[in-house]
Image (cartoon, grey):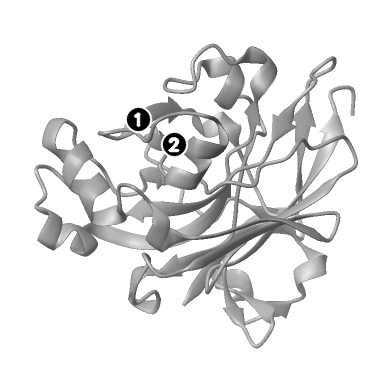
Amino acid sequence: MKHARIAWAGAIHDAIEADGQLELLTPAFKGRRVGFDEVVWLPPLAPMPAHRPRTILALGLNYADHAKELAFKAPEEPLAFLKGEASLTGHRGFTVRPAGVSYMHYECELAVVIGKTARKVKRADAYDFIAGYTVANDYAIRDYLENWYRPNLRVKNRDTCTPIGPWLVDAADVPDPMNLALQTTVNGQVTQSGHTRDMIFDVPFLIEYFSRFMTLQPGDLILTGTPDGVVDCRPGDVIVTQIEGLGALENTIAHASE
């Protein structure tokens, strides 16, 4: 099943995809269907408890071809960094390109949503701890980059710089997350093509690795990296990052003043 969170008629609703429409789950409107163009799309993630913010883990250089593209040796262990929830934005949203920046690029990524508390999980059991999957676009601003192996906050953790969605797809509906095609288009032109099977560290490995030393909680996210083919994105560009079976995430680049 494909789940979404949307704003419609002055309220926020949980919804599911039904015959090319959004079927609302809000009690007062339960069963009502609205069109994709009638709503504002939000990140498709349930809100976190006030006492525990969402942990967002992101991988750098997790595809050998992307590491080669950047003239780096493929890592021997996961290169991870953290992102804040304020960086998230929804489908058809806008991402701000700071004034004076010379190079800002997308990164189409499979995002894993944790479904239950995970601590010292064995690789063979890793899929049991996944609620579902969604598409993420992890923008990077190269002007601020000091070290590809550990991107600093100005590169990756900027407000609006992590579009996610449009759907949260149940894990049961994704038989093999390591067998999905990825593609990015900029203004309708294909600029990136890849496949999750080419990850250096696959999803079960990552869950085992992170849960060895930290507790993963329901709703936490792991962004699994991007293949090669990144290009600079300018204000007005429409970027669509899509993953087989998970949907197409659309995003528009805006000037900082907009």
Q: In the rendered view, would you say 165 is above or below 15? A: above
Q: In the rendered view, would you say 230 is above or below 73? A: below
Which is more N-terminal, label 1 or label 2?
A: 2
Residue 166 location in percent, x, y?
A: 62, 60
| Relative depth, front residue between 156 and 165 | 156
- Badge 1 local density, few (<14 within 10 Å), some, or many (20+)? some
Q: In the rendered view, would you say 223 is above or below 56? A: below
* Residue 97 located left or right of residue 43: right
Mark number for residue 169? Answer: none
Which residue is label 1 attached to? Answer: 79
* Residue 221 located left or right of residue 189: left
Asked whether the viewer can see residue 57, the reply is yes
Residue 211 location in percent, x, y?
A: 17, 40
Q: In the rendered view, would you say 131 is above or below 105? A: below
Q: Quadrant of residue 95?
A: top right
Label 1 sits on a secondary structure element that is strand
Question: In the image, what residue occupies the spot 86% across and 54% down?
Answer: 187
Which amino acid is tagged 1? Leu
Which amino acid is tagged 2? Leu
CA–CA distance between discs 2 and 1?
A: 7 Å
Question: In the image, what residue occupies the spot 59% across and 77% down?
Answer: 17
How many numbered marks have been drawn onto this rendered protein structure? 2
Question: In the image, what residue occupies the spot 90% across and 41% down?
Answer: 236
Residue 238 location in percent, x, y?
A: 83, 50
* Residue 146 located left or right of residue 39: left
Label 2 sits on a secondary structure element that is loop
Which residue is label 2 attached to? Answer: 61
Asked whether the viewer can see residue 157, the reply is no
